Amino acid sequence: MTAEPPGLHPGRRVTRALDALNLFLADVRDGLGPYLAIYLLTVRGPSGGWDEATIGTVITIAGIVGLLAQTPMGALMDRTRRKRAVVVAAALAVTLSCAALPFISGFAAVAATQSLAAVAGAVFPPAIAAVTLGIVGPRAFARRVGRNEAFNHAGNAASAALAAGTAVLFGPVVVFWIMAALALLSIGAVLAIPAAAIRDDVARGLGDCGAAGDGPSGWQILLTCRPLLIFAALMACFHLANAAMLPTVGQKLTRVVGQDYATSLMAGCIVAAQCVMVPVAMLVGARAEAWGRKPIFLVAFGVLAARGFLYTVSDAPWWLLGVQALDGVGAGIFGALFPVVIADLTRGTGRFNVSQGAVATAQGLGAALSASLAGQVIVHAGYSAAFATLGAVAAVGFVGYLLLMPETRSGATRPQPEGPRAAASA
């Protein structure tokens, strides 16, 4: 067996810094999410021109801006050798957008700050994946991604618990200050990773050593790899079903229990899900090679579909909290396997990060449309109809993954793009 190339066994300092980066970026990389919906609905309210449909429109605008940035940011991470500086700049942008929100109220201003945060957020997934791959190499990538996701979910749980405890005293606005503080801490974490520890050729998917002759394939890799295109469509379906579920739960809780307790209960929902995600992500990272990617992803789609329909059973806060815990299974699997499947499909092409960005663009489109879809269904047919609609979309995704997506793990028959090596070098 060929030995791992030198430099791909990170020391304790690098491992801890990577752990800290995933911990502190947990909330930052996903944006304000459901907290924004609660804040606008409870603090600004209908008297300020904010209802479910208007909130959904803002989230959709920010989502579209963010998805347009996904592929360029992925390409940037393939090309740049200053990955840490890019993460620092994005974290600063998130900090500014969060700190400004309590002081603005107009639709255009809110949409602008959330769009800025969305562009910055497009940096984090490919950046973390690239830094991770560049540090540990492809052989240890699946296990390390599972560890990344475990720390990511632990960070989400910790920040949500902090929000739950402080929102009672300071109101929903406290979430913005917490996120800004986490963004600043993430800057310290990324700077603690030595630049020399990140092998840039490995980070872009050129193989274990980035050896001479392993030049990057052309942009055709994005259009000629049929499994990559199928995977992109399925990820769009997953997020079309998933993205609006938690914000919709938050809005429903606001109607059921009132604004005084909605933020704390929402934080409780997040904590419950994140506590499930931590062991799920670790398990997936450890067993993805033995079990394969496809059966695990099918579990994620199946649980997501079940979750959508279970929300319709009861309006009781304890029931909604319990069903939301199932998000830990679907999201835990998705986070741990998403970059691994793309790494499988783009191995040796040098287009790992731009492919991540392209697929993330598709999933971002699904997520952006999800908020508007749920908001319009709520306004015209109610919350139960919205949850059932989202669950049905997830069921379609399950069938699509079962019938169309191949297994991609090492040792399986992995379909290749048509002539990736022959594609023009970019």
Image (tube, helix red, strand yellow):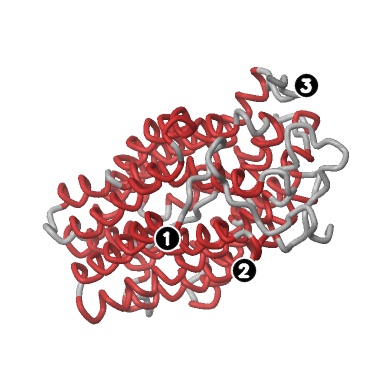
Instruction: Residue 239: give its label.
Output: 1
- For label 1, the SS is helix
Whether residues under marks 2 and 1 lie with C-beta atoms below 8 angstroms apart, the answer is: no
| Left or right: 24, with 291 as reference point | right
In space, the residues marked 3 and 2 are separated at their CA atoms by 37 Å
Q: Is residue 157 above or below residue 323?
A: above
Kind of residue at badge 1 = His
Query: What residue is shown with label 3?
Result: 6
Residue at 33% over, 43% down: 164
Q: Residues within 10 Å of mark 3 (few under 14, many from 20)?
A: few
Q: Earlier in the sequence, mark 2 or mark 1?
A: 2
Q: Nearer the viewer, residue 69 or 398?
A: 398
In space, the residues marked 2 and 1 are separated at their CA atoms by 16 Å
- For label 3, the SS is loop
Image quarter hosting the C terminus: bottom right
Q: Earlier in the sequence, mark 3 or mark 2?
A: 3
Query: What residue is shown with label 2?
Result: 68
Whether residues under marks 3 and 2 lie with C-beta atoms below 8 angstroms apart, the answer is: no
